[in-house]
Image: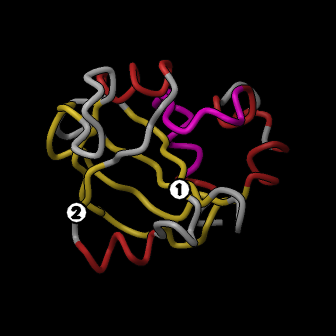
Amino acid sequence: MNHWLVKSEPFKYSWEKFNQEGHTFWDGVRNYQARNNLRGMQVGDLVLWYHSNEGKEIVGIARVIKEAYQDPTTDDTNWVVVDMEPVESLKKPVTLEQIKTDERLKDIGLVRQGRLSVMAVKPQEFDRILELSTQ
């Protein structure tokens, strides 16, 4: 199983709305590296949900339920989406500030490539985020 992180601006699509709907397809990606990460996602992979701009915190865990397919919001075949479902909210959101000051997360993509909207997360980084959410 792989681990990922996706970013969403809460005023556009929040963790709360995602939970109300029960599933979504992750669209709107127009960056080749992020698109390649979507293509790498497999059913069952876990995904950290990060609220960007407002909050700047990881708030929940989702799961990939359908692998990459053509983005239905465009006819351009370069772009794909994946389907996800919510798994659980974190006990306590983990802020970007916490992540930046944690020595064990110094190399996480969220810090190194702050503008990338879909990124891989190492298993030990994923586990550390979960630890921080319970402290």
Left or right of 92 in this view: 89:
left
Q: Which residues are magenta?
A: 113-129
The residue shown at (58%, 49%) is 129
* Residue 62 in the image: above or below residue 36: below
Q: Secondary structure at mark 2?
A: loop
Of residues 84 and 13, the one drawn nearer to the viewer in this rendering: 13
Q: Which residue matches tag 2?
A: 23
Sequence-earlier tag: 1 or 2:
1
Q: Secondary structure at mark 1?
A: strand
Picture quadrant where residue 9 is located: bottom right
Residue 13, position as x, y percentages in the image: 46, 66
Of residues 118 and 30, the one drawn nearer to the viewer in this rendering: 30
Q: Which residue matches tag 1?
A: 8
Verify CB contact (< 8 Å) between mark 1 and mark 2: no
The residue shown at (48%, 19%) is 32
* Residue 34 in the image: above or below residue 60: above
Left or right of 63 in this view: 51:
right
Residue 5, position as x, y percentages in the image: 49, 41
Q: CA distance from mark 1 to mark 2?
A: 14 Å
Of residues 86 and 10, the one drawn nearer to the viewer in this rendering: 10
Residue 19, position as x, y percentages in the image: 32, 74
* Residue 120 in the image: above or below residue 7: above
Left or right of 107 in this view: 6:
left
Image quadrant where one finds the N terminus = top left
The residue shown at (35%, 69%) is 18
Q: Name, please, the residue furthest toward the front.
A: 75
The residue shown at (46%, 31%) is 123
Alpha-carbon neighbours of circle 1 within 10 Å: few (<14), some, or many (≥20)?
some
Q: Which amino acid type is marked by label 2?
A: His
59 drawn magenta: no
Image quadrant where one finds the C terminus = bottom right
For the rendered model, the colour scheme is secondary structure
